[in-house]
Amino acid sequence: MTVMTYLYISPRDPLIARDGRPFGSGQSNRMRCLDWFYPSVLAGSLRTMVGKSLGYQFDTNQVALLKSIEVAGPLPCRDNRLYAPAPLDCVIQRDPDRAIALRPAPLKDGEGTNLPEPGLQPCQMPRDVEEGFKPGTGPPFWRMDRIADWLADTDGRSCSVPPRVPLDAGNTDYLDPVRDQRVHVALDAATGAAREHMLFTSEGIVLPEGVGISARVKAPDGNAQALSGLDALHSFGGERRIARFQVTDHSQIWSCPEKVRQALKGGNFVRMILATPAVFAGGWKPGWLDEHLEGSPPGCRLRLRLMGACVDRWRPVSGWSLEPPRGPKAIRRLAPAGSVYFFKVTDGETTDSLASLWLESVCDEEQARRDGFGLTLWGVWSPHQEG
């Protein structure tokens, strides 16, 4: 039996989410920061806190028990509302402001691509977009109701346009965390004085006032007692920066919005957006897709065929393993958050079952799913109409 718990994490200081580039003595003196925290940062911090509170010695059996805790997140949260990464199928036009939806489209005579699979269609803008169009920029996170509007809109023509960044102070529909850079000096352990020529910099993520991090945790009975009524300080991310972990009632904001649930009923074309980076056997491509680009996501019997995808460059994730044998972890390639996969339903009369996969993981490996990689948001789409 597992117990579901929702946590709200409030950073006390700017939090550090280091990327995998070298940092330290004899290497780089600049600590570089990711755009957002990987799920493994949350999973490692939470499981360590649970193990300490239960007095674990972190032997092999106890580590296996801790790794069975299912963690979902981290996602930004403000005023009991979740935020998710901006979807990559939304291209923003400025002057005049317009949100343009990318959609898979078949090639015309004489056209070709270098896409990795022969059955894929390139994702293109509508034909009515003016020649010489240049995309604008927008905030990296959208509030979940804005995401729901985008996912329920098949062609993207009726959705509001994300504003320019930096955001106005009163804008809560979107989120744009800022970076905090600090210069430090190394200290001599014997004298406590600064060491000459030993400067280094760190970079952290600063969340706006009133913004925290939300997480969903499924823990077996043996570990769940450590989360009951939790309200504690614990390190989160690099350099042991401190955050407050509190149990809260966030069950409603983690469920599929009704607008999306209704839109999914009976649709033949569905979209999958990655709310957190995903670990797939095929790199950018889910391992549950066969050689014909067809398959069913974990926990769903609906059979889907991949038509196209908007996927940014792969992101590296590594780290340092405290399990024997200790040492650096091998680098894995992640499909980045915000990536969009376009499917056509090939078997199944309704797509309503996809609502049950809202913010559930679709990674191929069970441990990656437990760690919170590959959380998904589902919606509908329609091919561009030729004008």
Image (cartoon, rainbow, N blue to C red):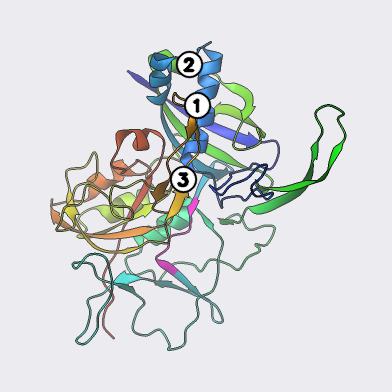
Q: Is residue 33 left or right of residue 191?
A: left
Span colored in magenta: 84-90
* Residue type, label 3: Val
Question: Badge 2 is on which residue?
Answer: 58
Of the pair 10 and 373, the residue shown nearer to us:
373
- Residue 56 sits above or below residue 32 on the image: above
Residue 174 screen position, x and y as percent: 56, 57
First of labels 3, 1 by sequence position: 3
Asked whether the residues under the numbered discs 1 and 2 touch, taking CB atoms below 8 Å apart as contact, a structural biologist would say yes
Residue 83 screen position, x and y as percent: 51, 49
* Residue type, label 2: Phe
Q: Is residue 213 visible?
A: yes
**Marking on residue 317:** 3
Q: CA distance from mark 3 to mark 2?
A: 24 Å
Of helix, strand and loop, which one carries label 2? loop
**Marking on residue 322:** 1
- Residue 231 sits above or below residue 148 on the image: above
Q: Quadrant of residue 218?
A: top left
Q: Is residue 248 visible?
A: no
Of helix, strand and loop, which one carries label 1? loop
First of labels 3, 2 by sequence position: 2
Of the pair 111 and 4, the residue shown nearer to us:
111
Of helix, strand and loop, which one carries label 3? strand
Asked whether the residues under the numbered discs 3 and 1 touch, taking CB atoms below 8 Å apart as contact, a structural biologist would say no
Quadrant for the C terminus in the image: bottom left
